[in-house]
Image: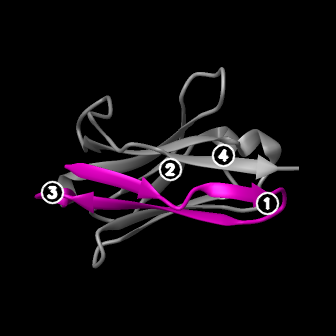
Amino acid sequence: VQLQASGGGLVQAGDSLRLSCAVSGRELNVYIMGWFRQAPGKEREFVGAVNWNDGGTNYADSKKGRFTISRDNGKNMVNLEIDNLKAEDTAVYYCAAKWIIAQGYNYWGQGTQVTVSS
């Protein structure tokens, strides 16, 4: 599986932003697609994930409410929408993939920078 994230940039606090991840590979129905982020000086953290097969989602508890993950099977894209952006959302955002039965994510995209100006 290959992943390429895009859509980052400099945004204002309170804005909304949609990040996209182009996905390529075979048998995508056996994968979970996740979004992670890493803020400056902090460890990478899980944002949420979507089951490619049925579209089911789950989110980190701290990310419920302002973050929405979806997948577009026709376009082979996974999207992350962030509403009401805050300065603390400034981070590099990564999309990742793992087999549905795997514990860890073993495929990673290159990341896209989001900078929120307050």
Dot placed on the residue nearer the N-terminal end, 4 or 2? 2
Residue 38 to residue 30: above or below: above
Dot placed on the residue nearer the N-terminal end, 3 or 2? 3
Residue closest to the far right: 118
For mark 3, what is the residue?
Answer: 25
For mark 2, what is the residue?
Answer: 58
Dot placed on the residue nearer the N-terminal end, 2 or 1? 2
Magenta highlight range: 1-28
Indicate the secondary structure of the residue bearing disc 4: helix
Front of the two marks 3 and 4 = 3
Q: Which residue is located at x 32 percent, y 49 percent?
A: 32
For mark 1, what is the residue?
Answer: 84
Q: How many marks?
A: 4
Disc 4 to disc 2, how far (Cα)? 10 Å
User: Callout 4 environment at 10 Å: few (<14), some (14 to 19), or many (20+)?
Assistant: some
Dot placed on the residue nearer the N-terminal end, 1 or 3? 3
Residue 62 occupies quadrant = top right
